[in-house]
């Protein structure tokens, strides 16, 4: 054992101890925990003491100091707690105070909402506000204004549910881009969460209606570097600073250059980290800015879109997307506050 | 798009691995969905070292060997091969390995000797026909090394997710162009492809604007909009038969089956060069003619797949001298199909209009490799060369002589140069790119750049890149070729936006908090419902017919979700949803109302040892929920629940408005006997505007965005009482049909300004209460801000109140 390993073992003992101490409810349980932790002959501290001797001489001073520190911390905790446990034992004769509290029903937010809230919170820190738009849309906002060429294979990227000849259930939240740009002058920095619809079978990985999250920043002088930097910053705050991020080419008719952002994540399946596509993004296509009535020479912008349901599923290990829609109270209550 | 690594190397002779090429493509060009070794089935095989080999005691043919498979344990393996030699290495299948033919290797006894695995021959591994003995490996790799590491066999497939903007990547040639640019290795035509036929090789070459004839064969274009160019190549004297192994291998690598040498050659040109080619049996074409003409009503054609297809009038079809013989750009006809006895061919190498092919494909619902490419756009500058390559390849693999090339019409090419400014590149990307780099990247993908001053160019895209029509298209090329990851990543200063949070979002958030505080669980069900009224909005093309309507009420979906829970024995259901209801209006679009709805049923509190069976939620809980939700949604408004007639219990009204914003009701459910009654609340938070032009917003960024007032902004501080309150109760006999609210109003009006609170705390019917009456009891609390109230004053108020009640309502106190 090296000094580092020894110090790590000390740290682990110090970390574990409070939880072990907290569950001991009776004097007899308490005595048992005390032996397990700091017993003289056996117990975890005694094990560490025994290993102290095996360390190289130059490491023993630091190791000894660390182990003594842990010992006194745990003993202080034990003493403090012992008094409480003893008092509880005396009081129990009159009234059994170990019986459960009277609880009330607790509300819960849907796991997809939790993801959206967390993402929105991060973008709020980066200066974005929330915009909304209708789910029943016109073909103009859903396709034409977003630079989808008429009668082109690009339309087949979106299997559309139609309501009428030129009305439909929006296939993405991108119509909110044009609606917002028509309504407000730049600078615009918005996040638009909302339901979208695709003509998909309802199976373990597809749903005909699901949440999407759109982001848009338009102003003079907005560049691809802004896109990269803002989305990388989002990824750092959402996934943690150590996750690597990369941008690769992609295609959406309403952005150019079009890109996708991948994040190196651990899905917790024991296969280590891998690159996962998190969102599609790109610079707002000049045709989209013009459709919204803006001068595309003067204004530039970037946009992104992502699927919070997929993030919720991988984050919580939910194997089947249908669980998100079933509304089984036993599922929803797992997310109770 | 499946790309073969080896095929690609024919075009770009590089030395990188498939994984490296895939990585380069995915970083700079196209999403890589996967890399798959075609011989993945050999992955479990390892290098096995035969340590000892001895004759089997009971057999002349068999040897008993000891094999080191790297596991640290020597395995007894029985082997029937004559060439097994101690000290040599062979492919080894451990027990549990599945052979390429599907056989599972298990531990078994062979004539009394145990065998723990198998030493394999080339044929057993699917590596050839050699079966005289086991496959000797010439390798330094230690035993246990995966076989694929020492025996590079089989091709590797790259699965590319080619999106509609890059039809040029739908061929090996197209992908090879990118690989050539990314690896800086020159592009060539693969060595397996014969040289283009020279003029001497072709007996007759003719061309025409709409018609030409040579070697007794005529090609005529009647509809040049649908088919701007059609090259017919006549090849005589072919011998249809099996393809050479290399050609079979190429096609197998991309998942295509070998059919015969002629068809395989056309498929090579499709997958290899991106040009769909069709071969007709020339002798089956009536009049030795091809006519591309509009359809006549009632025409039909049996396509290669044996299906008779009616061809819609108003489209265009490829005919011989008499009848339709191919669906243009989609599939050939069965009658003129190449078969074993075919000797003379007419090759069709055409350029069809993408929208036209898309129309045909949709009309016949038939998606083919050809239609997929024509719809997205085939290189219009390559038709002639493709015809040459196709003809030369057929002549090489099936014999025959190219007797005529009949070239009719012209292909449109996109030669319009686009102006590209270096300043615009820098501005859009956020980082300057040197002029040299711009020229290098764009040239590498086949663009021609003509300088326009020092800082701009006129860029002409190659014929295979019809997608490069705008300056921004070129900027994208520069950016992706440099690599997005090479651009800086620093957060830049930004100006705050002008857009305030959407009011419906703000209201939703407040309502949501209220629902959580009440103990409700948020749900997000699908907004489709099975049944609805005649006016309800129906999706025109639902995938499943069981739920084709859009809901008009959120309670409908919550009810079905409650039933879902009841069928799973869950009787405590407390759900809420904030979402859209679609109210039909007769207009193009429905009125989309953002609503909150809640459904409550079952125990109103969790059971506790002090209360093992808590009461179930009732209508009064629902009323309270409605009041608090409305209060949160419409801060500052006076919320009033008025009893409703019909299905609803209450309507929720705001201020003086007569139009309800919501209802409280009992929710009808398919409910087992053990379940309690469900109550629902639904409120309209607002209407989502869906006009054709979004309404102009306030452009206020100069002054900053004004946020809507907090719901609590209007609260005024009330001084905390310094003197004690006095209170008394009144129990009144109220006629059953008189609303308590009326009595409440009279009490409030006549109690005077010192009334601090008034609360109805009891209702009683029975002993001492005459029939037709009920006893209602209120507690009134009075307080004077500056002194203690005297008993006499209180008594006086009580008397006054009772007098007023008698006078105005005829209501008297209960005496007993």
Image (tube, helix red, strand yellow):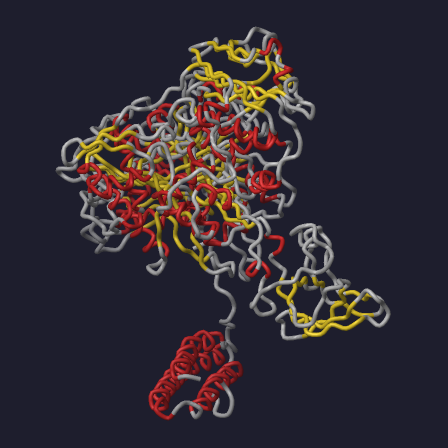
Q: Is residue A66 visible?
A: yes
Q: Which quarter shows the C terminus of chain A?
A: bottom left
Depth order, front residue of B257/B623: B257
Q: Residue furthest front?
A: B200
Position above or below: B646 against A239: above
Instruction: Residue B587: give x, y in percent of width and height.
Output: 40, 17
Coordinates of residue A293 in the picture (x, y in percent): 23, 26
Residue B152 to residue A222: above or below: below
Residue B683 picture quarter: top left
Q: Is residue A316 above or below residue B206?
A: below
- Asked whether B208 or B226 is in front, the reply is B208
Q: Position of residue B207 (x, y in %)?
A: 44, 14
Front residue of this view, candidates B398 and A64: B398
> Is B165 rendered above or below residue B24?
above
Image point (41%, 80%), residue name: A5
Query: Looking at the image, how many numbered discs can be counted on the residues?
Result: 0
User: What x and y, as percent, mark residue A34?
Assistant: 48, 84
B525 lies left or right of B503:
right
Nearer-the-camera pick, B683 or A116: A116
Q: Based on the displayed image, in which of its 4 quarters is residue A11 positioned?
A: bottom left
């Amino acid at each position: 054992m090296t000094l580092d390993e020894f110090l790590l073992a000390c740290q682990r003992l110090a970390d574990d101890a409070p939880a072990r101490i907290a569950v001991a409810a009776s004097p007899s349980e308490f005595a048992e925990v005390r032996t397990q932790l700091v017993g003289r002959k056996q117990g975890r501290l005694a094990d560490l003491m025994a290993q102290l001797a095996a360390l190289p001489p130059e490491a023993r001073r630091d190791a000894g100091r660390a182990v003594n520190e842990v010992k006194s911390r745990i003993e202080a905790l034990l003493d403090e707690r012992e008094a409480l446990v003893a008092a509880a034992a005396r009081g129990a004769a009159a009234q059994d105070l170990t019986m459960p509290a009277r609880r009330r029903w607790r509300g819960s937010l849907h796991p997809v909402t939790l993801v959206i809230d967390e993402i929105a919170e991060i973008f709020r820190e980066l200066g974005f506000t929330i915009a909304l738009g209708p789910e029943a849309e016109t073909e103009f906002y859903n396709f034409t204004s977003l630079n989808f060429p008429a009668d082109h294979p690009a339309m087949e990227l979106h299997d559309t549910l139609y309501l009428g000849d030129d009305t439909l259930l929006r296939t993405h939240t991108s119509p909110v881009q044009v609606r917002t740009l028509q309504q407000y002058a730049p600078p615009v920095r918005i996040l638009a969460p909302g339901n979208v619809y695709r003509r998909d079978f309802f199976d373990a990985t597809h749903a005909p209606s699901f949440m999407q999250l759109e982001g848009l920043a338009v102003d003079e002088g907005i560049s691809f570097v802004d896109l990269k930097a803002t989305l990388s910053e989002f990824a750092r705050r959402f996934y943690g600073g150590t996750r690597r991020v990369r941008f690769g080419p992609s295609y959406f008719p309403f952005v150019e250059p079009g890109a996708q952002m991948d994040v190196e994540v651990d899905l917790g399946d024991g296969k280590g980290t891998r690159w996962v596509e998190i969102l599609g993004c790109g610079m707002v296509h000049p045709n989209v800015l013009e459709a919204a009535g803006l001068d595309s020479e003067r204004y530039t912008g970037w946009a992104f879109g992502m699927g919070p349901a997929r993030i919720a599923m991988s984050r919580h290990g939910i194997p089947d997307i249908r669980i998100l829609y079933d509304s089984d109270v036993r599922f929803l209550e797992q997310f109770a506050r | 798009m499946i790309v073969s690594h080896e095929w690609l190397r024919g075009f770009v002779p590089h030395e990188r691995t498939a994984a490296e090429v895939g990585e380069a493509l995915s970083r700079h060009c196209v999403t890589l969905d996967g890399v798959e070794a075609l011989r993945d089935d050999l992955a479990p095989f390892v290098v096995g070292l035969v340590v000892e080999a001895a004759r089997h005691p009971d057999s002349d043919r068999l040897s008993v060997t000891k094999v080191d498979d790297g596991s640290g344990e020597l395995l007894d393996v029985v082997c029937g091969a004559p060439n097994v030699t101690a000290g040599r290495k062979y492919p080894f299948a451990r027990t549990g390995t599945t052979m390429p033919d599907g056989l599972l290797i298990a531990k078994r006894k062979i004539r009394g000797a145990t065998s723990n695995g198998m030493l394999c021959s080339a044929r057993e591994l699917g590596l050839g026909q050699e079966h005289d003995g086991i496959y000797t490996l010439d390798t330094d790799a230690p035993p246990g090394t995966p076989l694929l590491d020492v025996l590079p066999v089989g091709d590797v497939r790259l699965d590319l997710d080619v999106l509609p903007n890059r039809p040029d990547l739908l061929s090996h040639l197209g992908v090879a162009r990118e690989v050539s640019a990314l690896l800086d290795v020159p592009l060539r035509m693969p060595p397996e492809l014969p040289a283009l036929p020279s003029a001497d090789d072709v007996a007759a070459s003719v061309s025409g604007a709409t018609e030409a004839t040579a070697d007794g064969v005529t090609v005529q274009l009647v509809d040049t909009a649908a088919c701007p160019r059609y090259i017919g190549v006549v090849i005589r004297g072919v011998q249809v038969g099996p393809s050479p192994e290399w050609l079979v291998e190429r096609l197998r690598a991309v998942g295509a089956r070998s059919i015969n040498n002629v068809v395989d050659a056309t498929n090579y040109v499709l997958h290899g060069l991106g040009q769909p080619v069709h071969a007709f049996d020339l002798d089956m074409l009536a009049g030795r003619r091809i006519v591309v003409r509009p359809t006549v009503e009632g025409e039909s054609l049996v396509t290669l797949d044996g299906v008779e297809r009616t061809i819609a009038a108003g489209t265009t079809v490829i005919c011989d001298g008499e009848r339709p013989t191919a669906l243009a750009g989609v599939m050939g006809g069965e009658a003129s199909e190449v078969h074993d006895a075919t000797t003379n061919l007419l090759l069709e190498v055409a350029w069809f209009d993408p929208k036209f092919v898309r129309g045909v494909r949709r009309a016949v619902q038939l998606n083919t490799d050809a239609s997929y490419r024509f719809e997205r756009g085939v290189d219009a500058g390559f038709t002639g060369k493709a015809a040459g390559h196709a003809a030369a390849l057929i002549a090489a693999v099936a014999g025959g002589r190219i007797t005529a090339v009949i070239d009719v019409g012209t292909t449109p090419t996109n030669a319009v140069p686009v102006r590209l400014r270096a300043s615009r590149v820098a501005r859009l990307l956020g980082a300057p790119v040197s002029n040299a780099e711009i020229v290098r990247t764009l040239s590498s993908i086949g663009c021609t750049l003509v300088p326009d001053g020092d800082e701009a160019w006129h860029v002409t895209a190659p014929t295979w890149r019809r997608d490069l029509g705008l300056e921004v298209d070129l900027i994208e090329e520069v950016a992706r070729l440099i690599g997005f990851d090479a651009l800086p990543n620093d957060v830049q200063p930004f100006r705050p936006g002008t857009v305030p949070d959407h009011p419906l979002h703000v209201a939703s958030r407040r309502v949501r908090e209220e629902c959580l505080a009440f103990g409700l669980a948020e749900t997000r069900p699908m907004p489709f419902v099975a049944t609805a009224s005649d006016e309800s909005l129906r999706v025109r093309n639902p995938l499943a017919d069981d739920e084709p309507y859009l809901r008009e009420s959120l309670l409908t979906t919550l009810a079905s979700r409650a039933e879902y829970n009841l069928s799973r024995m869950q009787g405590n259901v407390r759900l809420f949803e904030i979402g859209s209801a679609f109210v039909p209006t007769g207009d193009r679009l429905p009125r989309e109302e953002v609503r909150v709805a809640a459904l409550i049923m079952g125990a109103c509190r969790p059971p506790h040892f002090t209360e093992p069976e808590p009461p179930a939620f009732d209508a009064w809980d629902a009323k309270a929920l409605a009041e608090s939700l409305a209060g949160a949604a419409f801060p500052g408004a006076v919320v009033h629940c008025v009893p409703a007639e019909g299905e609803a219990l209450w309507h929720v009204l705001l201020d003086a408005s007569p139009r309800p914003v919501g209802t409280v009701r009992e929710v009808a459910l398919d409910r087992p006997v053990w379940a309690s009654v469900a109550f629902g609340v639904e409120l309209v938070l607002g209407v989502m505007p869906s006009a054709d032009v979004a309404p102009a917003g306030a452009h206020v960024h100069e002054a900053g965005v004004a946020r809507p007032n907090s719901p609590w902004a209007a609260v005024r501080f009330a001084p905390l009482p310094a003197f004690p309150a006095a209170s008394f109760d009144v129990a009144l006999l109220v006629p059953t049909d008189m609303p308590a609210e009326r009595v409440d109003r009279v009490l409030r009006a006549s109690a005077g300004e010192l009334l601090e609170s008034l609360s109805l705390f009891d209702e009683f019917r029975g002993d001492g209460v005459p029939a037709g009456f009920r006893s209602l009891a209120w507690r009134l609390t009075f307080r004077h801000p500056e002194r203690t109230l005297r008993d006499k004053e209180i008594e006086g108020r009580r008397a006054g109140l009772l007098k007023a009640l008698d006078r105005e309502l005829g209501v008297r106190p209960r005496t007993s």
